[in-house]
Image: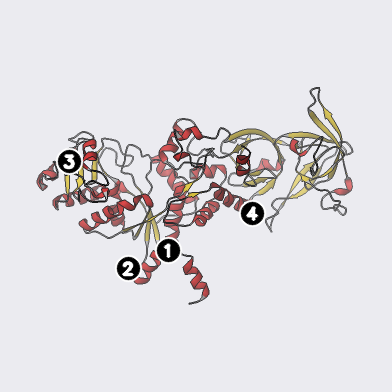
Amino acid sequence: MTDIKKEEEKSLNFLEEIVGEDLASGRYKSILTRFPPEPNGYLHIGHSKSIALNFGLAQKYGGKTNLRFDDTNPVTEDTEYVESIKEDIRWLGFEWENEFYASDYFEQLYGFAEDLIRKGLAYVDDSSAEEIARMKGTPTEPGTDSPYRSRSIEENLRLFREMRAGKYRDGEKVLRAKVDMSAPNMQLRDPIMYRIKHAHHHRTGDDWCIYPMYDFAHGQSDSIEQITHSICTLEFVPHRPLYDWFIEKLDIFPSHQYEFARLNMTYTVMSKRKLLQLVNEGYVTGWDDPRMPTISGLRRRGYTPESIRTFAEKIGVAKRENLIDVSLLEFCVREHLNKIAARRMVVFDPLKIVLTNYGPEEEWLPVEDNPEDPESTHRQVPFSRELYIEREDFMENPPKKFFRLAPGQKVRLKSAYIIQCDEVVKDATGKITELRCSYLPESKSGGEQSNIKVQATIHWVSIVHAIVAEVRLYDRLFRVEDPANEDGDFKEYINPDSLQVTAAYAEPALRQVKFNEHYQFLRKGYFYLDKDSSEDLLIFNRTATLRDNWVKEQKKQ
């Protein structure tokens, strides 16, 4: 075996090892995975790991992946979520082989349930939810049999058919599997298979008033589709024996479940219930608010599918839960945007500069779009007598090693000239309103004498040509690392400074901005055009800063 081959084998995660062995042994000729979201909310960054894993495994080993919506709870599900999920998966760069719904199998699942009743392995229970929970016992004490557990097969079939026909109210009866009320694994203590819900379903309408529970629908749907590797997160480990029990008793295709650690990330929450609270209670503007960990929120903020796929690859596939630092996700998007983002000059907090020895004429200077791109193009940027620079780039009484603009000090304007501050103009309150400067004509960037040395370069915008844009500066939504596990209401830990909105002055090239284009505003960060933009006002979301300042800021507090 070659060293390269050995290295490849060493780098395989445990799921890749399983799939490789299954194919090598001839257990399967090809693999079929599935991604089975419940359409009760928008996908978040945690789902991206599962998407990348299921689709990635199939791609690597020449298999296929089904998209199956687990739509067994009509109360919380909606077509809006179905469409958003499909859009997110495609945006991430994946395409499914078949689009299925658990509701496609309602009739078949009902038939499976009747099969189990006929085999004496399922029964209708009239007990309340509280009584069923009490009869289940505890992890250290066995459960007790329901008084309805001994009903005859004939009676159970009649009652189950009456449940389907709508004869009973919600909660009046359930269908339970007859497994083992003393099993150490509490999932096996006669789990509920069907419950009554008189609710309109987004696909089947009012055809059904009984709906299968996840544990009954999941494995059987896998089997119907002949899924070879059913990949779930670790919380489903206790459910695996029941998954196998149903398949064995029904004698159907033996799909098998494998578990991996779900993605938990710092400074956010992943629970759909908690995310829904944030939306419904107005803490964010919607599911696609750029502060949300949803894929649609990340997309709106300016994240790229490549960066999210790289993130999923870097965190790997593990068998133990851990908390991933959001800085890794931010690092991945910075790495990608640094390669693809066009550079633009935008001033957030303007200070006016007048070049006293520059004439009334203007000139257009060639500026490189992306120095990281070997095939980078150049744009023309207007230069004139009156400019804006960032207020923080000037100090009247600078400390040592402040190399930007100060009285009598020189600095280079990006891709333009070297200037020197000659006079500071203030208003009646003492606020600096204007700097009078002179420029060095021989210092033009790219010119024969442009090698005049200064110790700093700053960006700028020509005032007469500047366009005004709105800039939304997003930061982490929570101010603590693990808000879901803090004392009290998780919403108490929301970061009050997660969004700051400011006006900015941009070079005119930004007038040609398009959606799906990414920009680095020089020395400010990476930005992306927001959907709220109009012809009258461009709005940009900050995707990420140029470096991780969060840790530094936290240390100051």
Q: CA distance from mark 1 to mark 4?
A: 31 Å
Badge 4 amino acid: Lys
Residue located beneath label 2 in the image? 27
Q: Nearer the viewer, mark 1 or mark 2?
A: 1
Name the residue rendered at 75%, 47% in the picture.
380
Circles 2 and 4, Cβ within 8 Å, touching? The answer is no
Whether residue 536 is visible, yes or no, is no
**Does 246 sit left or right of 434 as displayed?**
left
> Compared with residue 243, is residue 554 higher up or lower down, i.e. above or below?
above
Q: Secondary structure at mark 3?
A: strand
Q: Position of residue 409 (x, y in %)?
A: 85, 41
Residue located beneath label 4 in the image? 339
> Compared with residue 264, is residue 471 higher up or lower down, i.e. above or below?
above
Q: Secondary structure at mark 1?
A: helix
Q: CA distance from mark 2 to mark 4?
A: 44 Å
Q: Position of residue 212 (x, y in %)?
A: 26, 45
Circles 1 and 4, Cβ within 8 Å, touching? The answer is no
**First-in-chain label (1 vs 2):** 1
The image shows a total of numbered marks equal to 4
Q: Secondary structure at mark 4?
A: helix
Q: Residues within 10 Å of mark 1 (few under 14, many from 20)?
A: some
**Does 117 sit left or right of 139 as displayed?**
left
Badge 2 amino acid: Arg
**First-in-chain label (1 vs 4):** 1
> Compared with residue 254, is residue 416 higher up or lower down, i.e. above or below?
above
